[in-house]
Amino acid sequence: MSRQLPLGLQMRASARFSGFLAGPNQEPVDQLKQTAAGTGEPFFLLWGAAGCGKSHLLQAACHLAAEHGRTVSYVSLATLAGLSPELLEGWEHYRLVCIDDVHCIAGDRAWEEALFNLYNRIRERAGNLIVSSRSAPAGLAFALPDLASRLGWGLVYQLQPLDDEQRLAALQQRARQRGCEMPAETGRYLLRRLPRELPALFAMLDRLDEASLVAQRKLTVPFVKSVLGL
């Protein structure tokens, strides 16, 4: 039986670059792919608002690196409450390390020092480190000033939000990956009535797809209204 990893160490099998609509973010996505493959910049910081796709991209980078035969490790610091920063010991032996939500440890001296030391060890071993945050390095309230400067040494990109047509395209792409069709009329209806963050929209699409399979109905506006009670 395989060991069950803590939630923050788990990666979604579906988190792939092919499932991410880049829109205005094509340049950072291309650069991220190069870092994941070991041919780009060794250090990468991706920042942006919640729900813009940072976690998806970090996990996609891990999957791509693994396809290139590289050892990988991923952690989300947003879901590791109560765990010791000793978790990061030895991670420099992975060829790619992805650390999500580094803003969550701002002000925690022990975690900051652990991340700072890991950065230096990865640099010594010529590995790759990709981190994400909700703000640029200068905006992170770290107790350890050198940590923000270290994280800003590599490539730093802000993920830009998608516009409504790009959100619609992302919904339709996600629906096709699930084996169903999302009519444009239905997608626009959902965008008008539901939270605009893509994770919330995707979760609702998963629910609608399951309901359509049970009812043997297409994702029309009337069917969506009946399922969601709108």
Image (cartoon, helix red, strand yellow):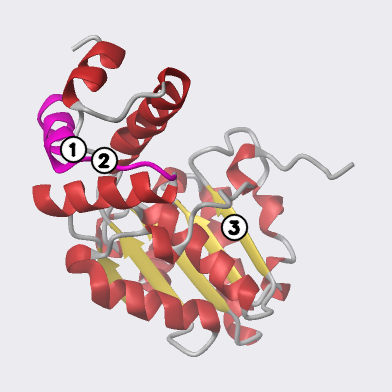
Location of residue 30 with respect to 158 vertically, above or below: below
> Which dot marks residue 200?
none
Residue 189 falls inside the magenta stretch = yes
Q: Name the residue beneath numbered marker 2.
A: 182
Give the camera-side residue of 123 and 159. 159
Which callout, 3 or 1, points at the residue further toward the start of the chain?
A: 3
Q: Where does residue 162 sit, x and y in percent of width and height?
A: 16, 54
* CA neighbours of label 1 inside 10 A, class few (<14), some (14 to 19), many (20+): many
> Which dot marks residue 74?
3
Whether pointer 2 and pointer 1 mark residues with C-beta atoms closer than 8 Å, the reply is: yes
For badge 1, the amino acid type reads: Gly
Residue drawn 18% across the image and 30% down it: 190
Q: Nearer the viewer, mark 2 or mark 1?
A: 2
Give the camera-side residue of 14 and 156. 14
Q: Nearer the viewer, mark 2 or mark 3?
A: 2
Which callout, 2 or 3, points at the residue further toward the start of the chain?
A: 3
Main SS, magenta region, reads helix
* CA neighbours of label 2 inside 10 A, class few (<14), some (14 to 19), many (20+): many
Give the camera-side residue of 167 and 138. 167
Q: Where does residue 146 sit, x and y in percent of width and height?
A: 42, 68
Secondary structure under badge 1? helix
Secondary structure under badge 3? strand
Residue drawn 62% across the image and 74% down it: 67
Distance (Cα) linking label 2 and label 1? 6 Å
Residue 14 falls inside the magenta stretch = no
Q: Which residues are magenta?
A: 179-193
Q: Quadrant of the N terminus?
A: top right
Q: Quadrant of the C terminus?
A: top left
> Which dot marks residue 187?
1
Residue drawn 47% across the image and 46% down it: 105
Q: In this rendering, does residue 52 appear at all?
A: no
